Amino acid sequence: MRVHLQKPNPPASPASLSPASPGIRFAIPPLIFGLCAGSALALEWAFFFDVGPLSAVGVPVVALIIAGFLVGAAGFAFMGWGFVHFRLVGTSLNTAVAASSLVDGGAFRFSRNPMYVGFVVMLLGGTILFDSLPFLLAALIMFLYLDRFVIPREEAYLRAAFGADYADYCARVRRWL
């Protein structure tokens, strides 16, 4: 487990002020995940209960249930691995707080964003489990939200805070998987 325990670099001058955090305060990823999953579930039960694209092509319901649980559990486990590693290192999960260290061990050896991968994979598990178009749409929305809004802000912050260490980490590990 490699952990860089340096504090983020202070800005060199007022002209080059770097943010004190990624600044994601309100639309935090767990909230957006909950909204996506809850909305997908409500849409599935209200409008799409009889629409099953996977079962329509002959995939047995039992296979969908097993595969959906396995995919969802894999996403949850990968997210949990990243979460536990953050806790072991003692850095904050709060995207409105400055990072105390750059974590590149555990699940972070395989993805720079294992918790976000977990969110998307869990929604894909719901897609399979419920044979659901709304869950597929929710997974796409979650992915786009994270990829276009959250991750770029976090990466800009980490690049400013940890400089060459973060650039080296980005060269070794992919954003998603």
Image (cartoon, helix red, strand yellow):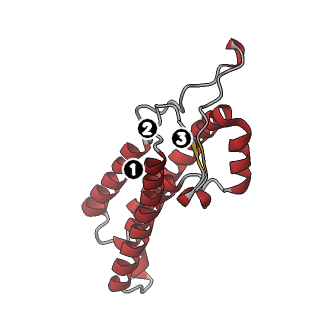
Pointers 1 and 3 in contact (CB under 8 A)? no
What's the residue at 47%, 36% (across, down)? 95
Q: Residue at x 46, y 31 (%)?
A: 96
Amino acid marked by disc 3: Val
Dot 3: element:
helix
Pointer 3 or 2: first along the chain: 2
Q: As shown in the figure, which amino acid type bears the numbered disc 1?
A: Phe
Q: Position of residue 67 (x, y in %)?
A: 40, 78
Would you identify the image quadrant in which residue 55 lies? bottom left
Question: What's the residue type where badge 2 is placed?
Answer: Asn
Q: Mark on residue 94? A: 2
Disc 2 versus disc 1: distance between alpha carbons?
Answer: 15 Å
Label 3 CA crowd tier, 10 Å (few <14, some 14–19, many 20+): some
Q: Which residue is mark 3?
A: 150
Foreground residue, 55 or 80?
Answer: 80
Marks 2 & 1, CB-CB < 8 Å contact = no
> Dividing the picture into quarters, in which one does residue 46 lie?
bottom left
Work out which quarter of the rendered image holds the C terminus and state it.
bottom right
User: How far is the residue under mark 3 from the one under mark 2?
Assistant: 12 Å
